[in-house]
Image (spheres, coloured by chain):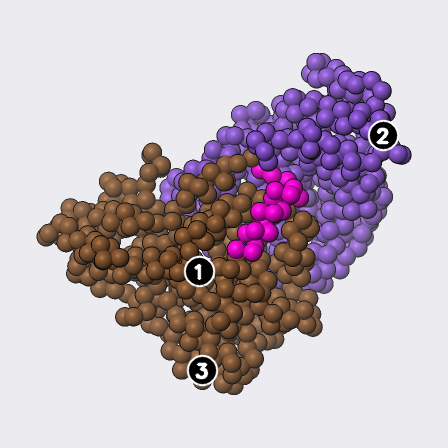
Chain colours: A brown, B purple
């Protein structure tokens, strides 16, 4: 990483604030020390505020995937039906987890890049045969954001629990768990929260917790059996398995940063990031992959025009300018690139990233007027 | 933590070297960057060396408990019989995990503090009805170390896989996975490895991997389904779930420190730590909890004499001297204390810890001659 001044602009892991890095570099505390226990409790309390819920927060060592599994392993029982609402790679990933745990998968699948058609979900839920339904807030594969609030209105007419994966949303885009009738919501530490990867964060509202309490059979997992963790989340001095003490305090610092900025301000900043990047790629003459009006604010996924070698562009961006963006995921490889702009990222980072993109494309003969794309982006920023 | 100069002498989490802390404080890398991928591969390669195996290493975000679950979830199938060899809190914990995964538990249980009687294990294994048997290397609740090598000789006469929990052993005490016929071995990052908690490390030998390959049914877990992780462990550029990039590089640094010291030297150092602490508590007139000749080298568990209030002693040690040791675990609360001495700990840390213990006891009226215990410890160190 040369002089450690490169710009990590992939859609997660994202840039971690020096404040968080300093917290991580502190001597490790005992997991039952007052200082750690108080820090853990503060993190859990800020987590609830971040999710917009009065429910129960869980913060465990593991990846976002573990939070997806915790939902299925605890809310669903063998033979239950689950509706997976899918419009991308991560939406489809739920199917494997449901099948692993002996559930029966049904799906409403949309083209990658298309938004979820709420009416089709409504129709499916009308049969009221599902134990739960899963929705992605943001599918990082396509850069789309689904309308969680509107989908949440369907919850009033179904008993199915509303399970949301907001790994690439929460902390960067509005999410109001209780207000939007979300029963279970998860995220990871390494996206819009701006902390390193390694921690899975999720919350259950009262209905979801009652479902866990009333299970006929115990979950088939041990580590993510939430009944075992609940006493520790209620009072973090308890012990079930050793918490990742250092990372927990790193996340606490990132949560404090979030609330110092203020949620509304932070959401607005991400919205401006998105608008600015959209303006930039438009000025570049590039198209946008996700359906119009459905852009996630945490990343931009432009379409690569015919004749542009995106791998070459990304290599130049990295080798010459030290800017790291991601290629297309899965079947979108070679068709899109993905630029993350979330968490601790600044306007300067975005200007530099789009600038590196322009310069690299210019070297490849794809740009006539250097500064046009960056100029369009800056126009958005100056009005902010 | 006042000025961050306290001594964390519990049996894990343990003191983390400033070198590791500096690694943790570095800007977060992309999980597919060459620098991270090379670091991950180096960590996995050092992990194999540490375990003494040519098998497959796994290094995942999670706690040691997750590594226990990974063993059961992947090696055992519903209805299989498992023999749990138990002489402490953690040995008994295996039962819950086996039951969660639909296995049938049988046990050889010894008193807490007693060593495992290898003949009784031999007798049990004679029936050859078990899919696997579990053994603790060190049970942190009692300070006992089991004779893994001798137990491993039984493996020649049984098809049952030999599964070892070395959370508080590896890196501090000899463990030679392949030589001792161990099929699956796990540890955590926060003990004798000297890294922060949050990472589960385990290895499977070829027999164990073949068992995973030949399963009739898939594991009931998703996140710890090892078939999904194997391609990433073989070539860490792959993706299944986001690795804890920062922690992985922290552990890499701690593994490098281990091999700079040299395994044999490190084992010897821990042996001397143990002898020195034993000499100290003997000079204090205190007894030792684990059976004679079976002390773990990574921690000391003295018996609290009649009339000594251990909570008061620990409070003084912490509040006045900034030294943190642990109380007795579970049913040993009030009967023992537990002092960890492993990983990055130094002789100076041990002298200071025993000194704080002596001073605190003196204030409570339990010590006549200050310096006697520390003197006995130092006598061992000077001969080292």
Residue at which label 2 appears: B287
Q: Does the magenta portion include A37?
A: yes
Q: Which residue is mark 1?
A: A170
Q: Residue at x 24, y 49 (%)?
A: A351
From the viewer's perspective, is the residue at label 2 or at label 1 nearer? Answer: 1
Question: Which percent across, then down, holds residue B128?
Answer: 77, 52
Tell me where residue A196 appears, x and y as whole percent: 46, 47
Percent of width and height locating residue A335: 27, 61
- Mark pair 2, 1: CA separation: 54 Å
Residue B42, can we see it? Answer: no
**Chain containing the residue with disc 1:** A
Q: Nearer the viewer, mark 1 or mark 3?
A: 1
Residue at horizontal 78 percent and vertical 41 percent from the top: B328
**Farthest residue in the right direction?**
B306
Q: Give yes or no for residue B264 being in the magenta stretch.
A: no
Q: Quadrant of residue B1?
A: top right
Measuring 71% from the left and 14% from the top, which residue is drawn there?
A: B383
For residue B221, side relative to residue B28 (left or right): right
Query: What span is in magenta?
Result: A28-46
Quarter occupied by the C terminus of chain B: top right
Relative vertical location of residue B366 with respect to residue A225 in this rendering, above or below: above
Regarding mark 2 in the picture, which secondary structure is present there? Answer: loop
In the rendered structure, which disc, 1 or 3, sits on the residue that comes first in sequence? Answer: 3
Provide the secondary structure element on which disc 3 rests: helix
Query: What chain does badge 2 belong to?
Result: B
Q: Residues within 10 Å of mark 1 (few under 14, many from 20)?
A: many
Question: Above or below — where is B224 with respect to B278?
Answer: below
Compared with A266, B26 (above or below) is above
Q: Which residue is mark 3?
A: A122
Q: Chain of mark 3?
A: A
Position above or below: B325 against B201: above
> Residue B304 location, x and y as percent?
84, 34
């Amino acid at each position: 990483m040369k002089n450690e001044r490169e710009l990590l602009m992939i859609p997660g892991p994202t840039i971690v604030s020096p404040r968080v890095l300093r917290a991580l570099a502190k001597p490790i505390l005992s997991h039952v020390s007052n200082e750690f226990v108080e820090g853990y409790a503060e993190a859990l309390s800020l987590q609830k505020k971040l999710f917009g819920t009065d429910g129960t927060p869980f913060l465990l060592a593991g990846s976002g995937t573990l939070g997806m599994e915790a939902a299925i392993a605890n809310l669903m029982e063998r033979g239950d039906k689950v509706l997976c609402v899918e419009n991308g790679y991560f939406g489809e990933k739920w199917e494997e987890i449901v099948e692993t745990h002996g559930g029966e998968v049904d799906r409403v699948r949309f083209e990658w890049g298309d938004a979820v058609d709420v009416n089709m979900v409504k129709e499916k839920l009308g049969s009221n045969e599902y134990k739960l339904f899963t929705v992605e807030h943001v599918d990082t594969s396509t850069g789309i954001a689904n309308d969680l609030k509107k989908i949440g209105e369907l919850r009033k007419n179904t008993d199915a629990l509303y399970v949301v994966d907001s790994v690439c949303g929460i902390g960067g885009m509005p999410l109001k768990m209780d207000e939007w009738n979300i029963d279970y919501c998860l995220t990871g530490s390494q996206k819009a929260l701006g902390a390193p990867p390694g921690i899975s964060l999720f919350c259950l509202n009262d209905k979801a917790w009652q479902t866990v309490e009333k299970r006929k059979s115990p979950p088939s997992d041990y580590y993510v059996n939430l009944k075992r963790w609940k006493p520790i989340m209620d009072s973090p001095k308890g012990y079930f398995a050793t918490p990742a003490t250092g990372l927990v305090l790193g996340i606490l610092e990132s949560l404090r940063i979030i609330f110092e900025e203020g949620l509304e301000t932070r959401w607005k900043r991400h919205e401006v990031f998105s608008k600015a990047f959209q303006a930039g790629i438009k000025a570049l003459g590039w198209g946008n992959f996700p359906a119009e009006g459905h852009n996630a604010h945490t990343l931009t996924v432009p379409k690569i025009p015919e004749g542009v070698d995106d791998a070459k562009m990304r290599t130049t961006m990295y080798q010459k300018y030290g800017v790291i963006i991601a290629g297309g995921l899965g079947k979108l490889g070679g068709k899109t690139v993905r630029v993350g702009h979330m968490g601790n990222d600044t306007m300067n980072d975005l200007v530099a990233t789009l600038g590196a993109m322009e310069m690299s494309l210019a070297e490849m003969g794809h740009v006539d007027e250097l500064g046009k794309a960056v100029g369009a982006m800056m126009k958005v920023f100056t009005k902010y």
